[in-house]
């Protein structure tokens, strides 16, 4: 699943190709929006809040989308189209006066709302380290509100701190040196929030650092624990363990950890 840094980098790329251009034809291929037309509106910017993409147009209109597990945006040059085999997956088509076309594939939670009312869709989200209105103190307060919540479950809760997905919460637990099932109230939450904010910002601003947590981008060495089950810990050599996600439970994703470097509670049965 794309994480907050993934969506922020996507927004930056889409802005580079489309910001300030006028939509000459739009095609919204979802029943609820099929009669809406964005033609004639200027595409102002792509903003983000956590994992949510907010495409803003002139005239107080925002197109909201969520990538979830499989969504993506693609851009074609003038006169080009996507391969025919993937056209059935297209949900949004925006042809621009500069000649490029934006294609939204397998997008989820699609909505059109007045830009002034975006809070209806994202107002429930917690503070986002990649936004100008980042409020670290509020993120700390929200994470401490239910101190018995396991560390990784608390970090995955987008209403507490927006933008962290499964990769980041597992890596942050390792960097903090605590078991993923440690009650969040038992950790240094101020340090945790600072670490999370620094990690996300580093990922989107430093060339070659995207989702690299170990300091090296060498294949198989870019993450401390995520995706490294049954392999030796890069710090101590202990075998990294993994438990599968619990279907239907958003707080119980696939979890990786090093039992030696991350002392604390074992996973629940």
Image (spheres, rainbow, N blue to C red):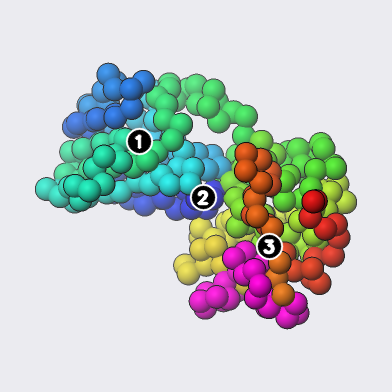
Give the spatial CA distance, label 1 vs label 3. Answer: 43 Å
What label sits on residue 176 in the rendered view?
none
Identify the element where label 3 is drawn.
Answer: strand
Q: Is residue 219 above or below residue 191?
A: below
Q: Is residue 119 visible?
A: yes
Residues at marks 2 and 3, CA–CA distance in whole angstroms: 18 Å
User: What residue would you read off at disc 3?
Assistant: 242
- Residue 202 location, x and y as percent? 57, 61
Nearest to the observer: residue 256 or residue 193: 256
- The answer, for residue 189, to whether it is visible in the render is no
In which quadrant of the rendered view does residue 96 lie? top left
Residue 196, given in percent of the width and then of the height, sits at 67, 55
First in sequence: mark 2 or mark 1? 2
Pointer 1 local density, CA inside 10 Å: few below 14, some 14–19, many at least 20? some
For mark 2, does the 10 Å Cα neighbourhood hold few (<14), some (14 to 19), or many (20 or more) residues? Answer: few
Report the mark closest to the observer, 2 or 1. 2
Q: Which residues are magenta?
A: 215-238
User: Which residue is most to the bottom?
Assistant: 237
Q: Nearer the viewer, mark 2 or mark 3?
A: 3
Q: Nearer the viewer, residue 245 or 224?
A: 245
Is 217 part of what is drawn in magenta? Answer: yes
Q: Residue at x 37, y 40 (%)?
A: 106
Q: Which residue is mark 2?
A: 1
200 on left or right of 58? right
- Dot 1 corresponds to which residue? 44
Compared with 203, 164 (above or below) is: above
Q: Give the answer, above or below, for where 260 lies relative to 254.
A: below
Q: Residue 220, image x and y in percent?
A: 55, 75
């Amino acid at each position: 699943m794309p994480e907050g840094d993934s969506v922020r980098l996507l927004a930056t790329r889409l802005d580079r190709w489309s910001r300030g251009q006028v939509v000459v034809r739009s095609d919204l291929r979802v029943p609820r929006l099929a009669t809406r037309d964005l033609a004639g509106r200027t595409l102002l910017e792509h903003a983000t809040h956590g994992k949510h993409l907010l495409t803003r147009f002139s005239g107080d209109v925002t197109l909201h989308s969520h990538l979830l597990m499989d969504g993506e945006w693609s851009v074609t040059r003038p006169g080009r189209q996507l391969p025919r085999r993937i056209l059935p997956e297209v949900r949004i088509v925006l042809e621009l006066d500069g000649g490029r076309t934006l294609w939204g594939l397998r997008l989820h939670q699609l909505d059109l709302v007045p830009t002034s009312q975006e809070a209806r869709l994202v107002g429930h989200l917690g503070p986002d380290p990649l936004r100008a209105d980042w409020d670290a103190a509020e993120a700390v307060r929200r994470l401490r509100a239910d101190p018995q919540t396991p560390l990784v479950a608390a970090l995955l809760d987008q209403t507490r701190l927006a933008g962290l997905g499964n990769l980041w919460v597992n890596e942050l637990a390792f960097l903090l040196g605590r078991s993923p099932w440690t009650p969040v109230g038992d950790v240094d939450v101020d340090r945790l929030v600072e670490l999370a904010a620094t990690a996300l910002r580093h990922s989107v601003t430093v060339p070659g650092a995207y989702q690299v947590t170990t300091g090296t981008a060498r294949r198989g060495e870019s993450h401390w624990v995520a995706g490294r089950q049954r392999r030796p810990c890069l710090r101590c050599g202990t075998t990294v363990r993994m438990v599968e996600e619990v279907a239907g439970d958003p707080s119980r994703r696939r979890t990786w950890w090093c039992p030696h470097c991350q002392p604390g509670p074992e996973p629940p049965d």
